[in-house]
Image (tube, coloured by chain):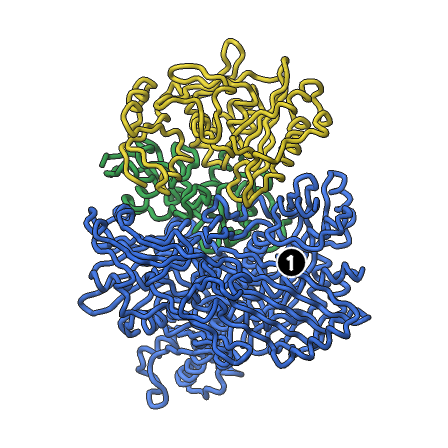
Chain colours: A green, B yellow, C blue
Amino acid sequence: MVQVKMTVNGKAASGDVEGRTLLVQFLRENLHLTGTHVGCDTSQCGACVVHVNGTAVKACTMLAAEAEGAEVVTIEGVANADGSLNTVQQAFQDHHGLQCGFCTPGMVMTATALLKENPNPTEAEIRDYLEGNICRCTGYHNIVKAIMAAAGQDVSRIAAE
Amino acid sequence: MYNFEFVRPTTIADAVAALGHEGAQALGGGQTLLPTMKQRLASPEKLVSLTGIAEMQGVCISDDGHLCIGGATPHAVVAREAAKHYPALAGLASHIGDPAVRNRGTIGGSLANNDPSACYPSAALGSGAVIVTNTRRIAADDYFQGMFTTALQDGEIITEVRFPVPEKASYQKFEQPASRFALVGVFVAKYADGVRVAVTGASEEGVFRWSEAEAALSKSFTADALNGLTVPADGMIGDLHGSKEYRAHLVGVMTKRAVAAAA
Amino acid sequence: MPKDHGIGASPKRREDLRFLTGNGNYTDDINLYGQTYVHFLRSDVAHGRLNKVDTAAAAAMPGVVRIFTGADFAGVGGLPCGWQVTDKHGQPMQEPGHPVLAQGKVRHVGDPIAAIVAETYEQARDAAEAIVLDIEELPAVIDMKAAVKDGAPKVHDELTSNLCYDWGFVEENKAAVDEAFKSAAHVTTLELVNNRLVANPMEPRVAVGDYNRSTDESTLYTTSQNPHVIRLLMGAFVLGIPEHKLRVVAPDVGGGFGTKIFHYAEEAFCTFAARQLKRPVKWTSTRSEAFMSDAHGRDHVTKIELALDKDNNFTALRTETYANMGAYLSTFAPSVPTWLHGTLMAGNYRTPLIYVNVKAVFTNTVPVDAYRGAGRPEATYQLERVIDKAARELGVDPIKLRRQNFITQFPYATPVAVEYDTGDYVATMDKLEQIADLSGFAARRKASEAKGKLRGLGVNCYIEACGIAPSNLVGQLGARAGLYESATVRVNATGSISVMTGSHSHGQGHETAFPQVIAEMLGIDESMIEIVHGDTAKGPMGMGTYGSRSLAVGGSAMVRATEKIINKAKKIAAHLMEASDADIEVKDGKFHVAGTDKSVAWGDVTLAAYVPHNYPLEDIEPGLEETAFYDPSNFTYPSGAYCCEVEVDPDTGRVTIERFSAADDFGNIINPMIVSGQVHGGIGQGIGQALLEGCVYDDNGQLLTGSYMDYAMPRASDVPFYTVDHSCVTPCTHNPLGVKGCGEAGAIGSPPAVVNAVIDALHSAGKTHVTHIDMPLSPNRVWAAMNA
């Protein structure tokens, strides 16, 4: 066991972990931040995406020890200070960009990373950026629409409610 | 995963020392190694992370005009910082895996693993890059020795990769529908002294140079120059995503597209 | 102006708040004090005799609590099958046992052999590697037609063969059907495969078993679409725990698509082991484990023949299907290729004579059961593909051929035993032609060709039977369960309402949509109504969510219970206003005396019910809580018409979906936003089946698509924005809401449109030798077909 220390959602966090402890395990099991999910074991589904030092990573494919000293942000840490949904979260609710909710934390974290890199992405750029985030419920329609809306684009011409 | 000891040295010397232990293995971004370990298909006793070594990070231009990329540089950094120097290479880096994978996966890790479907080996071979390690410089032509096999010795670390910058180049990837790795990927680079064509994803021998195409393109750098040229299906990978014949066919198609797109 | 509340409005989903902030409560988020972890050692061979399982060394490994094998379950029941099909000779299907842990033999890769319970998950996995197995590998049967040949290795030694049943439907019609084919002006024949799929809800399955020594009660937390059904099956048939001592809880469920209907070995194991060990036992599936332990879907091999007269009227239809059951009968497996498939073969068409033959076959593969649509996609695919092929052979427009044969009079009794209550197939096709902009296709094709791409257009119709189902009918058909739904409407003293339902959302937004119905009936605000589901301790026996039934059946139960509430509340209100209850009207959350300005508020009535000081105690009981069980009198029959436009890259065979349009008739709509979302998701899965997904075994029964590295899941870049419309409404005539259900339509209606479009694209380039390509239409398959 070794001790790791990092900042998670703005608060200092530490814990004893094995070498093999994944970041996602540390978040879920040590810190009880269960919003970050595990949907696969081949680093493809993206349900576990969190931000480490400002960039999106798959928490199932990073060791907790690799995050030593890092600033980690999870889905639990992205709402507005008053607890209300932030722009991306609100757009997902407004445009029905989630159904079962399991992929949603990863989708929100990936969408947030995209908009930071590219504040006004095209539909194709959004779809391309979601390469590593699999959703089985929505057919992606309302996820892409929600991200366009979060970017401030007019989505009223995109078909359907 | 089997348990292991984790260390994260900050200098190449310390990393080399740590890798001297029995059962030690280098860890780049871990985007291939960690999933492999989760399946319990690898069992290193010690993982030596290379991502804490500052001198192995970043992209620069050397005095002799080479594009130099630190061995622990993530794909996303290459995509961003190599764009104006070597757009084809940056373009390749910007389409490896997905954004989260690109933020972790490193060029050194990719080249050390030499997955037969990975993108970077085609760029290194197609550019005639030099793989710089803690002990020596290895020409790409000598480095790749069949799938998952390289010239690296135990404990040897890729510290830097040096790419001669071509006049024109392009990488064209045809993705395997599930993994999104290259079913076939072709890197074409035109230099003053000739054209190099490197193919990944297709061959049972791993990344390879298509010498007939290189000869034809060195005479005339046009897609039409490739008319009539084919690679034999024998020796290609055949699996549920693509037969040997299909992969051989795609090598031709992707090479033509790379020539047409080269910039 | 769209409504902003009640039926027909699209309020934002209330469940989203917790899902968007990481506060969902999925089964894997549950951790209990003293919890242990189980890892299942699974067979890595497809078929073998299990001579010995030596656990001695493993049991001594660090952290191991106990190791269980098949022997520990000798006195325990096997996993039951919930549906018995009778074959064409009147004999019951062959029904093998299905042990919790393998006994004597292993029958598919992934069959659980031993369960290692340890203090940590990794310790359990470590110990699994120390178990010594002596398995004598036997020849595996994978191909269905080979499996039913004489002398084929038997999956179950105690059965006479690998044939589960040979079903003929309607057997009495067979001679007439054969006769019709002899006199047909044209016969179109098509052989096809409906590819094996893996449902892949993004949340892998999880089970946590718990046991309370004080009360002798067992609790199972599980990823289930129907916790009451799990309680019944596991309690009564597997473990012998009476239902009052067994609680099953399914908290937030991260998608199901059918595969979380069934009762699985891991659920029974965790419940059983927690009782044995007096400690909680948790199992979390990995995705790789899911591929070899979740029930798969589809996997039919079919020959279909369509007979037409000289005027292109359909005169008869004949099919022969081999349906893969896998190694064991999963909970509802036998019903899928029979009653959920054969009964749909009339589709939207007036075909007077139909005969369906289905041979269900055991193979050394993972069990196959319902996956989104379940039988109906298989029926729709073969029918809509053979019609398209017939249109090409006859040189007629495929839309025209469909229109000519549409059923137009309702109710309509099909020759395959169901009666469609309502529908308007002409209207949905008209709507489709409009929203898909068919008139603009020629120009779009030209633009594609200018880029060197082939463009194709494919259209199909679909009909489904859902809202399952009348219990007395399904009982006759072999179901060993009823298919009603329950609702308890509990009005609290202050007027808020808790609604306990046996339906259970796994993404469908029940917590938002159901209150819209009740709020509309009572004229109160939706925020006063809370849906309680997924816990057998909280609500009456219910049958769960699948078969597009939650609103049509579960919603109807809520309507019935709310009607009882209104009737009783009217009596209370009448008493309070000293009026006759016959004169009371409910409007805007108040009870009015008709023709007067007298009224009492909803809250005054509810308070009186629980503080019955001024109350008709001699006539009615205090309190305001009512339960209804609703059993439908027929299936519901949503229908629609779908259109897909593809581009094919002639150099690589790669297909891209350029446009996708869906015109559906779901009857009345409660929440249009949620309905559209359901259609989008179904289309996404249908495109996945058509272009990407396929579960493949090699000849030895090794799973070649055991992870997302080889099983191609649709990504955002594989699909376009969809155009969906559900403005064509023919309300269901037999449920109180007039609703039909929308959950499966997209997955049923979309695969044939995609394949029809690809064939159309290839024909546009003169590749007329390509009459069919089996799904998934991978680039390699399309390229190979073009160059054959």
Q: Which residue is drawn at 36% across and 72% down?
A: C232
Q: Position of residue A85 (x, y in %)?
A: 43, 47
* C443 shown above or below B228: below
Q: Can residue C498 be seen in this view?
A: no
Q: Which of C393 and C219 is in front in this view?
A: C393
Chain identifier of the residue bearing label 1 in the image:
C
Q: How crowded is mark 1: few (under 14 residues within 10 Å), some or many (20 or more)?
A: many
> Helix, strand, or loop for circle 1?
helix
Instruction: Identify the image quadrant of residue B92.
Output: top right
| Residue C761 x/y as whole percent | 72, 49
Check disc 1 and report the residue beneath it: C752
* B188 relative to C479, above or below: above
Which image quarter is the N terminus of chain C in? Answer: bottom right
Residue C136 lies, with reference to residue A155, above or below; the image says below
- Does residue C486 appear in this view? yes
- Depth check: give the residue in front, C111 or C436: C111
Image x and y of residue C520, in percent = 51, 70
Residue beneath the point at 41% across and 82% down? C568
Dividing the picture into quarters, in which one does residue C316 lie? bottom right
Residue type, mark 1 in image = Pro
Quick one: which residue is furthest to the front in this view?
Answer: C151
Image-based side of C501 in relation to B46, left or right: right
The answer to which of A158 and C398 lies nearer the viewer is: C398
Give coordinates of residue C327: x percent, y percent.
44, 62
